[in-house]
Amino acid sequence: MSEETQAEIADRIDRHGDRYNNAGDARNEAEAREAAERARNADTPAEARQIERDFNRGQGRDNS
């Protein structure tokens, strides 16, 4: 099994942004898009996963 890439992690976060957009929740959509961009630009997959964990905690989802 290959390690997930930064882009794959960022895409997963971006899907949260899509859901928030569909719900008309601009604030949370913006947070998701910003987290996705940071994950996409992370130096390593581990760093991107940490960004995702931080995002999830901030949204009330703790996937530790």
Image: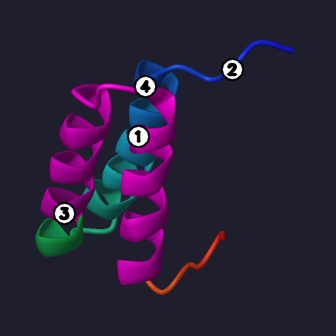
Q: Earlier in the sequence, mark 2 or mark 3?
A: 2
Mark toward the start of the polypeptide (3 vs 4): 4
- Which amino acid type is marked by label 4? Gln
In the image, residue 61 sits, relative to residue 2, either above or below, namely below
Foreground residue, 24 or 5?
5
Specify the label residue 15 is tagged with: none
Q: Amino acid at mark 3?
A: Glu
Residue 28 % position (x, y): 23, 70
**Does residue 12 show up?**
no
Asked if residue 57 lies in the magenta stretch, the reply is yes
Residue with the mark numbered 3: 31
- State which region is magenta: 29-58
49 is within the stretch colored magenta: yes
CA–CA distance between discs 4 and 2?
Answer: 10 Å
Q: Looking at the image, do the residues carrying marks 3 and 1 touch, with CB atoms under 8 Å apart?
A: no
- Secondary structure beneath label 2: loop
Q: Horizontal and vertical percent for residue 5?
A: 52, 19
CA separation, marks 2 and 3?
25 Å
Q: Name the residue that disc number 1 marks.
A: 48
> Label 4 belongs to which residue?
6
Circle 3 sits in a helix, a strand or a loop, which is it?
A: helix
